[in-house]
Image (cartoon, grey):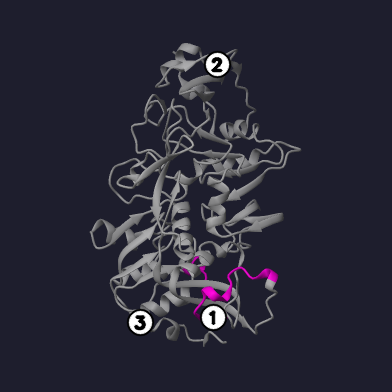
Amino acid sequence: MDKTIGDVAAAAVADIPDGASVMIGGFGGSGAPIELIHALIDRGPRNLTVINNNAGNGRIGIAAMIDAGMVRKIVCSFPKSKDPRAFTEAYLAGRIELELVPQGTLAERIRAGGAGIPAFYTPTSFGTELAAGKPTAEFDGRGYVQERWLKADYALVKAETADRHGNLVYRKAGRNFGPLMCMAAATTIVQATRIVAPGEIDPEQVVTPGIFVKRLVRVETPQQEEDLNRAEAVYP
Amino acid sequence: MTDISDIKLSNAQIAWRAAQDIEDGAYVNLGIGFPEMVARYQVEGRQAIYHTENGILDFGPAPAPGEEDWDLINAGKKAVTLNPGAAFFHHADSFAMVRGGHLDVAILGAFEVAETGDLANWSVGKGGVPAVGGAMDLVHGAGRVAVITDHVTKTGAPKLVERCSLPLTGVGCVTRVYTSLAVVDIEGGRFVLREKLPAISMGDLQAVTGATLNLDGPVADLTVPEL
């Protein structure tokens, strides 16, 4: 089994159609799969639903997707950043829909999506406006809010090392949403700095088992969102 | 009446006071912004382990400029370092630590805190782009949920109130408030005054507080070093 597409990110995202839902890993720039995002911008599907913790920063990555008019809706916890112009302008102009989800609820909804759990109860947001319209219940004297699973057509995730079976190891706090999104998408596409032969990753150290990964692309020298923004980069 | 701007504690001093209550070996989450300052005043001889929502336990201070690794950041997206014994984990595990009752202390900022323990700290409720991040998760699960804040707003309005007027972050979640004038516990739906600056009278303190300050035993002097 070899899930490697090669070194060309474009091939890995070539079938993502208009209207798709796309989970994108990363917390701010940490773990953001910039090369896969930019390959998707080159391809240019529209009307996308993007699921990410944030909503872009600067003129690259998810912000550049918004600038390119590709995003219909964002599901995120924190649509603010150092340079949130792309999202802010689109949102205030009514060009983009926002589903605001508390960060831990976002993570658990994605986990539940990948784990086949359609709904769960959490204390988070109980009694707040973000619980409006959602079922609530009391367990052992405390109030909880029912939240639904979250799944997607595609996930774009950045890993440090992959073997050809798709077993993954991440880099530092860049792990964040990666293992959850890999589980929750019908087609998970991973960019990895290194792709090694099966057996070269110690099975004890595997973070995401390959069953959750469909396609691998090697990006040997991945760019960091923060570095690009400090250089005032613009994509395309 | 005392002009409280002459006597009130600085943010650093409020952070220092909150740090005195962090036990050796505690697992602690500090909210982004002002609460991050608490880590600077860890008591000599005690070692707390700091959790950041994006997936690190036991991170350390910022690296030297130029040494940043942008995969190694905290919830405020600032570059951090690792202490020996640090661990990485994904977001679902990270918030399991939060909601699952595994943290000993969470210290957060506030727009308003009510005597019921309700907290408002995520939205000023008027248009713009709403953003919540981990605020609504962090108020649930930690053994103690403490707030550090100025006692009043920039315009002088009380931040300790009977009921919050701004959108809530959580209901009945705060257990202690460290302000620029006092230390106040929340017990049984009421504020209980524990410490106050010696320079302010009970009457003047009550006058800048939006709900009754109850007494339950002696009120200690709030004494903090110059920082």
Contact, mark 1 vs mark 2 (Cβ under 8 Å)? no
Q: Which residues are magenta?
A: A204-228
Q: CA distance from mark 3 to mark 2?
A: 67 Å
Q: CA distance from mark 1 to mark 3?
A: 18 Å
Residue occupying image coordinates x 70% and y 74%: A202
For mark 2, give the secondary structure: loop
Upstream in sequence: badge 1 or badge 3: 3
**In this rendering, the label closer to the viewer, 1 or 2:** 1
Foreground of the two, A205 or B217? A205
| Residue denoted by label 3 | A43
Kindly identify which chain the residue marked by label 2 belongs to: B
Density class for disc 2 (Cα within 10 Å; few <14, some 14-19, many ≥20) is: some
| Residue denoted by label 2 | B199
Q: From the viewer's perspective, tell me whether residue A157 is left or right of residue A235.
A: right
Task: Write down the quadrant of residue B103 in the picture.
Answer: top right
Foreground of the two, B193 or B171? B171
Vertical order, A137 against A147 (above or below): above
Density class for disc 3 (Cα within 10 Å; few <14, some 14-19, many ≥20) is: some
- Residue A219's tag is 1
Q: Which amino acid is tagged 1?
A: Val
Contact, mark 1 vs mark 3 (Cβ under 8 Å)? no
Kindly identify which chain the residue marked by label 3 belongs to: A
Residue occupying image coordinates x 65% and y 32%: B20
Residue B114 appearing in the image:
yes
Q: Which amino acid is tagged 3?
A: Arg
Vertical order, B80 against A114 (above or below): above
Vertical order, A227 against B227 (above or below): below
Q: Estimate the x, y position of residue A158 in percent, counting from the top left.
A: 52, 72
